Image (cartoon, rainbow, N blue to C red):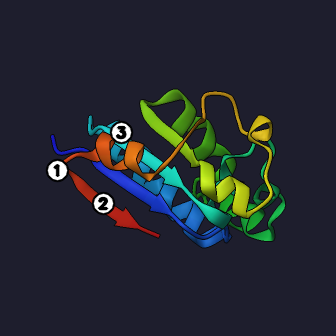
Amino acid sequence: MTPLGILLRHGDHEAAHYALVLATGAAAIGREVTLFATNGGCRVLLAHPALLDDPREALLASRGVATLAVLLDAAAELPVRRIACEAGLRAEALDPAALAPGVEVAGVVTFLGAVGAGQIVSL
């Protein structure tokens, strides 16, 4: 199958949620997936993302929709390669030590190399 690269540029709940829906869904059907977060998107890859306290989390759960918490756990368990952009971390003044276990720190060249001739989706 064609590799899938997901570029997460925003740190808002909606973008983060759907990036993780795409990543986990594609990984579940056997696609090679790389989630590359930059700038505000890096915040979703923190060990304790503030988005987990967003009111939408409770709303999604009450409607039977997978929450960010569920999707983050799934992404860590599935073969989703998670990369936080080195420049994006600096731009947001985020410490790489605050990232969730298993999240790599690298640049756009690493992301593009991982995706190769595959498909890239930007959120």
Q: Residue at x 59, y 62 (%)?
A: 16
Residue 63 in sight here: no
Mark found first going from the N terminus, 2 or 3: 3
Residue 113: percent from the left, percent from the top?
30, 42
Residue 38 percent coordinates (x, y): 58, 59
Q: Is residue 55 left or right of residue 26?
A: right
- Give the distance between the C-alpha atoms of the residues marked 2 and 1, in whole angstroms: 9 Å
- As shown in the figure, which amino acid type bears the numbered disc 3? Ala
Q: Residues within 10 Å of mark 3 (few under 14, many from 20)?
A: many
x then y, percent, for residue 12: 67, 71
Dot 2 falls on a residue whose secondary structure is strand
- Image quadrant holding the N terminus, namely top left
Q: Nearer the viewer, residue 34 or 70?
A: 34
In depth, the one of 34 and 39 nearer the eye is 39
Q: Residue at x 64, y 64 (%)?
A: 39
Query: Residue drawn at (20%, 51%), measured in percent from left and top?
Result: 118
- Say above or below: 22 vs 76: below
Q: Nearer the viewer, mark 2 or mark 3?
A: 2
Q: Which mark is residue 120?
A: 2
The residue under label 3 is 27
Which is closer to the viewer, label 1 or label 3?
1
The residue that label 1 is drawn on is: 117
N-term-proximal mark, 1 vs 3: 3
